[in-house]
Image: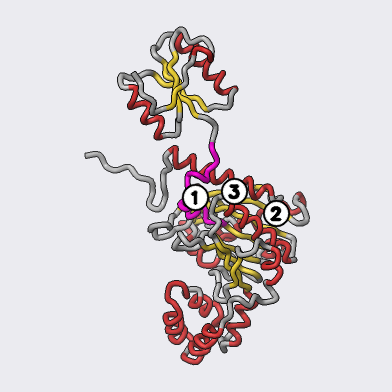
Amino acid sequence: MANPVNPPRGMRDFLPMEKRKRDSILDLIRGTYAAHGFQEIETPAMEDIARLTSGQGGDNEKLAYRVLKRGAELDEAVANGGELADLGLRFDLTVPLTRYYATNRAQLPTVFKAIQVGPVWRAERPQKGRYRQFVQCDIDIIGDSTSLAEVELLTASVNVLNVLGLTDAVIRVNHRELLVKLLNQLGIAEKDHASAMITIDKLDKLEVSGVVAELAERLGDKVAKAFEAWIASVDAEAVPAELAPLFELVEPGRLRYDPTLVRGMGYYTGPIFEIDHPSSGSSIGGGGRYDGMVGRWLGTDVPAVGISLGFERVVDLVSEEEVAEEQPAIVLVLEDDSVETTKNALAMQREFWAKGANVRLEHKPKRLNLLLDSMSANGYEAFAMINSTTKSLGDVEVRAIGQSVE
């Protein structure tokens, strides 16, 4: 028995029809973002490991794939007990963006609006919906400290969701400064803020009782009881002044104030977002303002805010009907192997190309129906038979695949 040949755990192959759907969705996302004035950029798959582990990536830094030094540098590191890796695969698109901006700032607009789409890698424990290689779709605005930046990001995100048919999606919104005030009100020392946020972030999984119990264990009964009293009194309808412009300017009903929203990354400095959809068990996107990150490379702070769409989860939610139709796809079946038939087939292929169709050439097999079934499963809708007498499109009978074949 042959051994199974599979991709590495947590990574996937995509069959042609899966790839077609993914690319169609990516085209819709890119086109919508571009219509809002964002420009697409590209960064390398790898960055310096020191940059990837500089403290900006939160817990994701622990999941970075490291790339060994090469040649004499590796030999020297092994001999002297030094660091063996000098590069790492990017675990998100935000850290590379901040490096990109610092490198290319002089050539970029004062307010830079970026689209980034590409694969990222994390050494996760593979499980349903969690992969080691996956695609992220990010938009970011660097250089604008006003709430207009958040409004633009959220408006573009809502429009993308609408274009994809995900009109039930809602973006939860909170503010890091409000979280800090809350933690202070609960009597939590600054050194314990990060720990408390990690616990509060589990509210959707542990519910109130579980979070109260964990806070009591970590920070004491007084803090736990204060949190329990606070959450019982929360009025999520009362949008705070810090977030009011967003709710006034973004499409009504698409934002929801969530005073318990945390987001795991420690680098957020202002509004934070998370995109929810009723058919997904996890958020399908998120982001926030991160004004301190770019300054790590420039030496001077630059305001920045971004949001990422969880592409893999979005793909699962988008129906085939919402995917833009592609060009007509036709199979030209050569009835024999003669030079004349092949010449005619190539000429007909060029004619169909001129009409905007995708055209595949195939030899006629003994069982034509089996070929057509395979082509149909791979996105081809029609076929035509080509022989030595097929000299023009007028000689071609195009039939839908599935139509009876003699």
Side of 142 where 205 appears, left or right: left
Q: Is residue 169 left or right of residue 98?
A: left
Number of marks in the rendered image: 3
Position above or below: 378 against 10: above
Q: Quadrant of the N terminus?
A: top left
Distance in Å between CA atoms under marks 2 and 3: 15 Å
Q: Along the polypeptide, which appears first: circle 2 or circle 1?
A: 2
Q: Which residues are magenta?
A: 309-325
Residue 89: in magenta span: no
Tell me what residue is drawn at x 70 percent, y 56 percent: 102
- Could you tell me which secondary element the residue under label 2 belongs to? strand
* Foreground residue among 341 and 42: 341
Q: Position of residue 139 (x, y in %)?
A: 63, 55
Say the numbered circle drawn on residue 318.
1
Q: Which mark is residue 29?
A: 3
Q: Nearer the viewer, mark 2 or mark 1?
A: 1
The image quadrant of residue 238 is: bottom right
User: What amino acid type should be assigned to the residue bearing mark 2?
Assistant: Lys
